[in-house]
Image: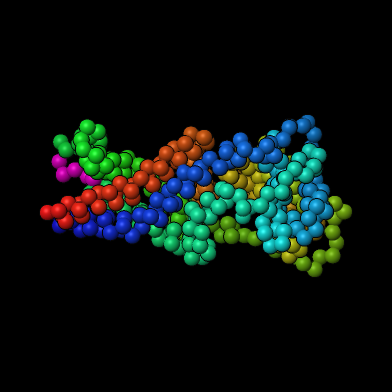
Amino acid sequence: MNFKKSIRFLHKWLGLTSGLIVFIVSITGSIFCFHDEIKDLTRDYRKVKVESKSYVLASELQSKAKELFPTATADMIVFYGKDRPAIVYSSINDKPYNLYFNPYSGKFLKQESIEDDFFAIVEDLHMHLWLPPEIGKHIVGISTIIFIVMLLSGIILWWPKKRKDLKNRIKIKWKAKWRRVNYDWHNVTGFYISLFVLVIALTGLTFSYEWMHKTMYFVGNLGQDNPKDDFSPAIDATLTTSSKANPMDIALSQAFKIKPDDEMFFVWYQGEKAAIITGSYPDAMDFDHQSNLDFHPKTGELLSSNLYENKNPGTQLQEMNYGLHTGQFFGITGKIIAFILSLFAAALPVTGFIIFWGRRNKKAKK
């Protein structure tokens, strides 16, 4: 009894200190779940007609971006899929933009401000509470850790002393008074979603803390370390010879040949002292099962490859993190589940506060 009393005290006050942030993070998470689907419905420039010809060269899109916006950087180009535009990620006057182009003709389609995008604003609230990232991510991270403790303490408080009491703990008494319904809702839904929400919370911590990212690698590899995972090819900056073709085009062409069945590709030029990185994914708009290739920034020579099928389980788990957190890993079904779980998680601090307020007023009346 003393143990449960201590757990109840801990559960209550941790909830009161973090409840508002948990509510905000959960609600914004549910809004963000279907951001791609909503944008596809409301923004016609996110889809293009499929054509039976090759994509335009990455260097051509890079040149067009700089012609249209002379102060723009154009170092990363993404081909999102056969029926989707290519995007040149740019910084124009120190503001980030997406520049949309038809991948078959190179026709400019749309300039989109990332900072002013509704879902980018929601994402920033979700991750940083609209505070400077170095401050906001810790507030969200600490609140997430508190929420994890609350999920575990909630299970302890929910757990019945006798087996015969179990049936009363797994259902809501809908015909009871509203305070009782609220109490049951808090306890019953909290128990049912606890394991699934725990996964969402733990994967969310990787966006706040590097140690959690490394923990996923450690768990996936069962404690084994692979030095090759930290390998970065050395670049000879003194090399004067260069290829006739643009190294970015060579790199992307090689990526197409090595992963011909993949749907989504990116190429990233990092300057003459770092490798050109390409990445590919099997499905459009699905950031999982990533394969990476490194190329020389002057010659386009392939320096190293790290295909998904050759990556160790720890690295694969790390790259699976976003999909697990958003439900994307399990397709549209996973997104629907993540959406519902986020709404139920947002309700927990609300119903918990109603329980606290009701008991406080009850004591005051007595």
Which residue is painted at 44% across and 58% down in the image? 140
Q: What residue span does the magenta drawing correspond to?
A: 158-163
Rendering coords of residue 218 (x, y %): 46, 55
Q: Is any part of residue 120 visible from this angle?
A: yes
The image quadrant that residue 84 belongs to is top right
Q: Main secondary structure of the magenta part?
A: loop
- Residue 287 in magenta stretch: no
Quarter of the image with the N terminus is bottom left
Asked whether 340 or 309 is in front, the reply is 340
Rendering coords of residue 293 (x, y %): 68, 51
Figure coloring: rainbow
Determine whether, in the image, residue 174 is placed left or right of residue 258: left
Determine whether, in the image, residue 273 is placed left or right of residue 337: right
- Residue 162 in magenta stretch: yes
Asked whether 268 or 65 is in front, the reply is 65
Asked whether 303 or 145 is in front, the reply is 145
Q: Is any part of residue 324 visible from this angle?
A: no
Asked whether 50 or 237 is in front, the reply is 50
Q: Residue furthest bottom?
A: 238
The image quadrant that residue 341 belongs to is top left
Rendering coords of residue 304 (x, y %): 68, 54
Q: Residue furthest right?
A: 244
Q: Residue furthest left?
A: 366
Which residue is painted at 61% across and 46% down in the image? 290
Number of numbered labels in the structure image: 0
Which residue is painted at 25% across and 52% down in the image? 357
Q: Residue furthest front?
A: 365
Against 19, residue 46 (above or below) is above
